[in-house]
């Protein structure tokens, strides 16, 4: 990968290329821009696994009608502060973006806004949404269900997804607090890396295909992931699915279709978006001072390893984001080319 | 402990005894009942560490004015759906109960209700609150900060609490989904049990006093707890403190006073209560069917160990609760006596 030629591309240029690629897939102007905003921000944050190259895999599904390029997205307003988006199998980040802005619109008026989404697909990483909310002064709690890769605690079959959840807290006077995490001990990529290095893995990372914890990365890759803290992470993954799947009207647990096995079929993924307008809770100075004090207390903790200072969630991604907005991003030339192919 | 004489006591009797004990501490009628409801339910659920015997330790602090028996609790209404309770150092479960009912009141009208609490103390376990909400058809997300016992990930000093969080989802046609968990890998009680058995402990349970992971339960007991999934549980514990501490106006991180070290001083603990009125999201049959299907999918998973079937969060506690409501609870006679001492 290190040998691949790179091209320095600025944020605006990467966005223009992404919008072009999405428009060629039949996604129209404003919708293409909303999707590009999420995926470009993921790349700028260094979250390349969820960046603009996802347009290529979304595109493959759009071409076989597994994702709907021209959806009829409808909004049901259960309460002044609670809405459900019926996504009509639209591209995930479009629904994520719509849900976020709808939620903030309600929170602007009522303090809190909550949006459930059904009929969706993979919506990208959570951190770009939390960042957009934080920039406007909104706290956010965002979650999604996902394709089934994890067994219930003590069980032997995959029944739940590695469901991501994220919390964002705005700092009106400094850097935001952004947590974006899934509920497995590690991502599959770390298991693949251990296999490539021919190393064994800790027993709490994964199980074999029968649900038995394993040290062997090959067995793990044909098996299932384990959740953080065993039954605790299992409980949290279920709670996320209750919010994002059960209450939203989407599929849940193994009703969620695997996009890699059935790329031509709707997944009916579900998401959950909650935002709070922090402006009504106190003055910007009040919140800014508390956020700064909070950060300082954490950062001032002496580290076990002097070379690895204590960090706050999102710190690394926000540094990468600020740097890349200023200096552009060194992007894989071949992937950029693929995005620009007619 | 097995030799201690037990007395079978019914729910109503345990509540009457608890109200009496609270009234003798100067907590008045309705307030004493609200506190008793939470703590009695904890005992009925089998969560005895957070049951009515807590009245004895709360009482010690009330007697030295570390907790305020006659608080002036005030409500600030930031938005129609968002309120902050200034707790005036009241007994924790009273503030928890007030916050829960205030949240449900707002959610009844607007769909969502959110209450921040400051100036509080230990509010008991979360599950009784989630249960009360679920019985009335409300989803709940409840969290609290806590006395400092955990170091930031990679750090060497305790800066954050083992913050509990809980999710409750009502099943209008069957049993509710109730998750109540803290963010450490295990509770300190498990480390004490290992020490008493002279066993070593896994490396991800705790650190020594310098923040270095340890197998030695004695070192662990003078050290700090570790969070589930390392930096992931750390991130979640911080997010809970942001909600319950920073946004509520309470103390956060090591600003929270330790009740065992400074029993005569206000802790200024903070809590967070969110409820959603699920009635507006769909018919009771719709939700009941989805909840039943969800449970069935999980329960039908073959277990690794046939003797340990796959369970849902709260299942054990709800079974205990139903059983004890019907059959009464075999309670430690000496503790019951202490609660009835003038």
Image: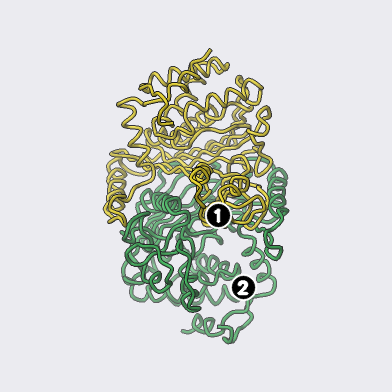
Chain colours: A green, B yellow
Quarter of the N terminus of chain A within the rendering: bottom right
Q: Is residue B33 above or below residue B317?
A: above
Chain where mark 1 sits = B
Residue A323 image offset from top left, x and y in percent: 68, 69
Q: Is residue A137 above or below residue B25?
A: below
For residue A17, what is the image quadrant?
A: bottom right
Chain where mark 2 sits = A
* In this rendering, position of residue A239 left or right of residue B304: right
Q: Nearer the viewer, residue B311 or B81?
A: B311
Residue B258 image offset from top left, x and y in percent: 65, 36
Residue A251 shows in this picture: no
The CA distance from mark 1 to mark 2 is 52 Å
Residue A82 shows in this picture: yes
Circle 2: is it few (<14), some (14-19), or many (20+) Cα within 10 Å?
Answer: few
Query: Mark 2 falls on what kind of element?
Result: helix
* In this rendering, position of residue A120 left or right of residue B327: right
Q: Looking at the rendered structure, which numbered label has been put on residue A279?
A: none
Q: Looking at the rendered structure, which numbered label has been put on residue B215?
A: 1
Q: Are labels 1 and 2 on one chain?
A: no
Query: Mark 1 falls on what kind of element?
Result: loop
Q: Nearer the viewer, residue A202 or A221?
A: A202
Most extreme residue toward the front, as rendered? Answer: B198
Residue A268 image offset from top left, x and y in percent: 35, 60
Q: Which residue is mark 2?
A: A12
């Amino acid at each position: 990968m290190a040998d691949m030629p790179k091209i320095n591309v600025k944020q605006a240029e990467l966005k223009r290329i992404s919008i072009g690629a999405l428009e060629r897939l039949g996604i129209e102007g404003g919708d293409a821009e909303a999707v590009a905003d999420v995926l470009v921000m993921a790349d700028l944050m260094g979250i390349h696994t969820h960046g603009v190259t996802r347009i290529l895999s979304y595109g493959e599904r759009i071409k076989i009608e597994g994702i709907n390029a021209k959806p009829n997205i409808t909004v049901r307003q259960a309460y002044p502060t609670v809405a459900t988006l019926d996504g009509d199998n639209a591209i995930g980040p479009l629904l994520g973006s719509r849900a976020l802005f709808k939620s903030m619109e309600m929170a602007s008026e009522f303090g809190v806004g909550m949006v459930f989404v059904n009929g969706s697909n993979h919506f990208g990483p959570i951190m770009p949404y939390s960042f957009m909310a934080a920039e406007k002064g909104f706290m956010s709690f965002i979650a999604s269900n996902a394709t089934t890769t994890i067994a219930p605690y003590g069980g032997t079959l995959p029944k739940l997804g590695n469901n991501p959840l994220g919390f964002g807290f705005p700092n009106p006077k400094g850097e935001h607090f952004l947590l974006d995490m899934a509920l497995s001990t590690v991502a599959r990529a770390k298991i693949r890396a251990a296999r490539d290095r021919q190393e064994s893995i800790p027993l709490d990372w994964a199980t074999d295909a029968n649900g038995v914890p394993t040290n062997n990365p090959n067995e793990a890759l044909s098996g299932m992931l384990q959740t953080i803290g065993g039954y605790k992470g299992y409980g949290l993954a279920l709670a996320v699915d209750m919010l994002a799947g059960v209450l939203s009207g989407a599929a849940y647990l193994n009703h969620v279709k695997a996009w890699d096995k059935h790329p031509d079929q709707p997944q009916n993924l579900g998401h959950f978006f909650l935002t709070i307008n922090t402006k009504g809770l106190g003055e910007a100075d009040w919140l800014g001072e508390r956020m700064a004090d909070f950060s300082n207390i954490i950062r001032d903790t002496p580290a076990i390893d002097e070379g690895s200072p204590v960090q706050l969630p999102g710190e690394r991604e926000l540094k990468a984001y600020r740097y890349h907005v200023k200096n552009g991003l060194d992007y894989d030339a071949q992937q950029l080319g693929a995005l620009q192919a007619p």
